[in-house]
Amino acid sequence: MHHHVLIFLDYHMHNQFLHNLDDNHLNLWTNDFLSFLCYI
């Protein structure tokens, strides 16, 4: 589980970078998390 969290953080930071951190940050984070659940 912990390993997945670390992978998720990497995955999320990478996506954040691609999205250039707009005002919808929290929403973006949730969407990334949902994508990530499908990704693993």
Image (tube, rainbow, N blue to C red):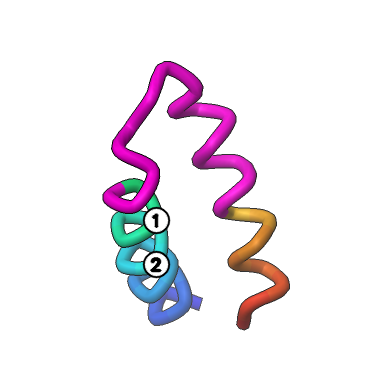
* Residue type highlighted by circle 1: Asn
Q: Secondary structure at mark 1?
A: helix
Q: Residue at x 62, y 82 (%)?
A: 40
Tell me the magenta residue range. 17-32
Label of residue 15 in the image: 1
Is 18 magenta? The answer is yes
Label of residue 37 in the image: none
Q: Is residue 39 above or below residue 28?
A: below
Q: Residue at x 30, y 55 (%)?
A: 13
Comparing marks 1 and 2, which lies closer to the viewer?
1
How much space separates mark 1 and mark 2, taking CA atoms? Answer: 6 Å
Measuring from the top left, give residue 4's x and y in whole percent.
47, 77
Measuring from the top left, give residue 36's x and y in whole percent.
59, 66
Q: Of 13 and 20, which appears nearest the observer?
A: 20
Q: Characterize the magenta stretch by its predominant secondary structure.
A: helix
Mark 2, residue position: 11
Q: Of 17 and 32, which appears nearest the observer?
A: 17
Q: Secondary structure at mark 2?
A: helix
Is 26 magenta? The answer is yes
